[in-house]
Amino acid sequence: MDPEPANSPTPLPAADSPAARATSAPPHRRRPRYSGKYPRRFEEKYKELDPARDEETFRKVLASGKTPAGTHRPILVSEILEILKPTPGSVVVDCTLGYGGHSAEILPRIQPGGRLIGLDADSIELPKTEARLRAGGFGPDTFSVYRSNFAGLPAILVECSLPGADAILADLGVSSMQLDDPSRGFSVKHDGPLDMRMNPNRGQPASVWLEKIRPEQLAGLLLKNADEARAQLLAPQLAGQRFSTTRQLADAIRSSLPNAARNDVEMTLRRVFQAIRIAVNDEFSALDSLLRQIPACLNPGGRFVVLTFHSGEDRRVKRAFEGGMREGIYSEISTAVLRPSAEERQDNPRSSPAKLRWARRAVSGCISGDASSSPPS
Ligand SMILES: C[S@@+](CC[C@H](N)C(=O)[O-])C[C@H]1O[C@@H](n2cnc3c(N)ncnc32)[C@H](O)[C@@H]1O
């Protein structure tokens, strides 16, 4: 695969610049009509997709425990604010800007004098998120946006002339906008091109990746990325095959499991999709790289919070934090994972698998590659 270069941040044009206006005004297209009383297809949900126009529909969808189309509901917001403690003048990095839900809460808290650097790999959603947050009154002096893999964070801090951040957040995985849009090819629930790239301008779509991979490699990845117990059975059925759409892949998985219970098949489908997504986006390499670089990106005493969504991610975070604690890089780490309350899980079922861990950089001590620590005498 062709992993995204870690240190090629692309600053976006300011939302009110001519360049941004040129890209934010698509040619007028007649909207698709509802095929019934309740729109089922993503493109038909235009009332949700434009919440400013129809607040009531938006509120109703939220109240029903769903995520309105084209949006994302931030998870564990008050817990994250409590840990990161953004205060006026703080420098904060949001490694995974997404819809900007967490950043929208952090930005007003760091004024006056604070700065938030937002990163995301997603070239489709990022300009929309930037425009929304800028419309909230946050200009380039307080809010900078980079279309970048978070593995490139050290280079971005250098570009921003910042020795480090007081608080860093990484909310891993995919956003609801990515999951729900069939054209992105992430979801087993919607038929669309089998793509799954967070940045569709880089790397290869899942369809091409799957066609090139060997069965023994795929079996290993299904196990490593999603703890898939049927990896050996499924891999020969899927590897080297051309599946153009998510439905074709889902059908092939279903027909490989003729005797399995329906619920079991659905869980397997999710795990296989997850394993392929992680591989296509090289997610574990990016996370390992971020975890290695975080101490040097934090100011002494700075805090780091990570939200993970499956055991492969959580294991890595736990190991990195425990190692950092042993080496004296961190002065404090979370001793247990924090999970969304029953109320939050009911209100937003997508929050259910989330696990939060945090670490605090030691106030003293030298970290290699650290711009904020003093040079050895
Ligand atoms: C769960 S969403 C974040 C949601 C966000 N916290 C909010 O409140 O709207 C995860 C985001 O991380 C981005 N992402 C995942 N891996 C990334 C990486 N290695 N580098 C940069 N962005 C990444 C995805 O594109 C997605 O937008």
Image (cartoon, rainbow, N blue to C red):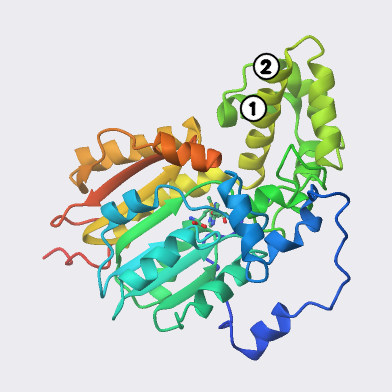
Where is residue 359? Give x, y as percent.
Answer: 27, 47
Per the image, the residue denoted by label 1 is 222
**Residue at the top extreme, as displayed:** 259
Count neighbours of disc 1 (C-alpha within 10 A) and say few if under 14, some if 14 to 19, many if 20 or more: many
Q: Amino acid at mark 1?
A: Leu
Q: In the depicted view, which residue is nearer to us: 147 or 202?
A: 147
Where is residue 44? Give x, y as percent.
Answer: 81, 57
Secondary structure of the residue carrying tag 1 is helix
Horizontal arrangement in the rendering, residue 246 relative to residue 58 (left or right):
right
Q: Amino acid at mark 2?
A: Arg
Q: In the depicted view, which residue is nearer to us: 214 or 364?
A: 364
Q: Is residue 337 visible?
A: yes
Q: Residue at x 29, y 80 (%)?
A: 112
Horizontal arrangement in the rendering, residue 226 relative to residue 358 (left or right):
right
Q: Is residue 210 above or below residue 74?
A: above
Quadrant of the rendered image containing residue 54 = bottom right
Quadrant the C terminus occupies: bottom left
Q: Is residue 253 above or below residue 353?
A: above
Dot 2 or dot 1, earlier in sequence: 1
Q: Residue at x 58, y 32 (%)?
A: 225
Q: In the depicted view, which residue is nearer to us: 219 or 73?
A: 73
Marker disc for residue 339: none
Q: Is residue 11 visible?
A: no
Cα separation between marks 2 and 1:
8 Å
